[in-house]
């Protein structure tokens, strides 16, 4: 049995990470997928046992995974990581550093062959109302919703290596998959597909309880390419609003692990039979 875990949107929460570390050590999954937003919000401080953590990656996350690996030895899982829209691009060298230490496999618009499967990672989301734009691109066309800020506005912690006024998620996904056979593709996305059970966001307008804020490009990619499995996060409240953390699109099975309640949300599944997945909320 090759048990896998999907988690997402831990946002530098020490308690949630400690629950994850303990669960990995206890249950020994073969694979752990982390679908972005690992770090504290840019303007938030992080504390552990009353002490300030000035550098979350160097002072907590990398040492935390090292400790888990040292304790588990050969049972340490393959960990696959992407950044999310709340993870500053200036922190990317530390994700690469963790990958060089073999703590995880960092997939930033990249792929990794593992047995019969190819794992693809893609961190970008469509434009949001938030100002950090390191991991935002236009979706299918160069247009945005009325309440969002364009990707070439807001602020960035690093200079983009692409044209921020024209780059789209749709073009990226076409290049990433190219002519590849996607029948055994596992896609680790931060954004969920648009107009689905996985992308529902809460709004304060009393006439409209929720809106769909996922990626149309990812939706079209799933519809046209039919990858084996897609893994998502980003929209914390979607499961509460839609009542579902999973959805099937043709032969593609999709999960969203983001959570807006107490505890750690873990989607547990077997890669060879993902339709039997379960979602657990771990609180102690």
Image (tube, rainbow, N blue to C red):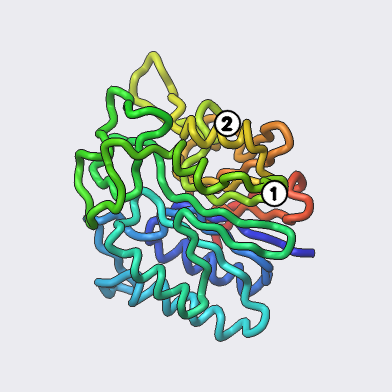
Residue located farthest toward the front when viewing the structure as drawn: 179
Check disc 1 and report the residue beneath it: 278
Residue at x 43%, y 39% (from the top left corner): 169
Q: Is residue 47 above or below residue 206?
A: below
Callout in the foreground (1, 2): 2
Residue ID at (67%, 78%): 75
Dot 1, how many residues are within 10 Å of its Cα: few (below 14), some (14-19), or many (20+)? some
The picture places residue 220, in percent across and down from the top left corner, at: 55, 31
Q: x, y percentage for residue 224?
A: 62, 32
The residues bearing labels 1 and 2 have C-alpha atoms spaced at a distance of 16 Å
Location of residue 80 with respect to 162 vertically, above or below: below
Q: How many marks?
A: 2
Q: Quadrant of residue 136?
A: top left
Secondary structure under badge 2?
A: loop
Which quadrant of the figure contains the C terminus?
bottom right
Which disc, if any, is residue 197?
Answer: 2
- Residue situated in front as seen by the camera: 85 or 112: 112
Residue drawn at the location 41% of the way across and 17% of the way down: 208
Where residue 127 sits: x, y (%)?
A: 33, 36
């Amino acid at each position: 049995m090759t048990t896998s875990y999907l988690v997402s949107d831990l946002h530098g929460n020490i308690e949630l990470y400690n629950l994850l570390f303990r669960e990995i050590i206890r249950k020994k999954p073969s694979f752990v997928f982390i679908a972005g937003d690992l770090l504290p919000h840019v303007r938030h401080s992080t504390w552990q046992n009353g002490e300030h953590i000035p550098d979350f990656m160097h002072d907590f996350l990398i040492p935390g995974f090292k400790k888990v690996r040292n304790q588990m030895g050969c049972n340490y899982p393959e960990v696959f990581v992407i950044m999310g829209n709340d993870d500053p691009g200036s922190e990317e060298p530390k994700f690469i550093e963790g990958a060089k230490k073999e703590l995880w496999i960092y997939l930033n618009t990249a792929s990794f062959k593992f047995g019969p499967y190819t794992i693809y990672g893609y961190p970008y989301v469509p434009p949001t109302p938030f100002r950090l734009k390191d991991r935002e691109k236009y979706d299918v066309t160069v247009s945005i919703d009325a309440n969002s800020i364009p990707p070439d506005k807001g602020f960035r912690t690093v200079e983009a290596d692409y044209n921020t006024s024209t780059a789209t998620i749709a073009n990226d996904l076409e290049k990433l998959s190219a002519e590849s056979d996607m029948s055994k593709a596992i896609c680790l996305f931060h954004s969920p597909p648009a107009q689905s059970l996985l992308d529902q966001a809460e709004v304060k307008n009393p006439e409209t309880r929720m809106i769909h804020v996922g990626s149309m490009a990812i939706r079209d990619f799933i519809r046209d390419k039919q990858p084996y499995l897609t893994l998502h996060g980003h929209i914390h409240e979607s499961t509460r609003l839609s009542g579902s953390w999973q959805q099937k699109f043709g032969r593609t099975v999709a999960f969203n692990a983001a959570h807006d309640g107490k505890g750690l949300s873990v989607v547990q599944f077997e890669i060879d039979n993902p339709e039997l997945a379960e979602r657990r909320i771990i609180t102690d």
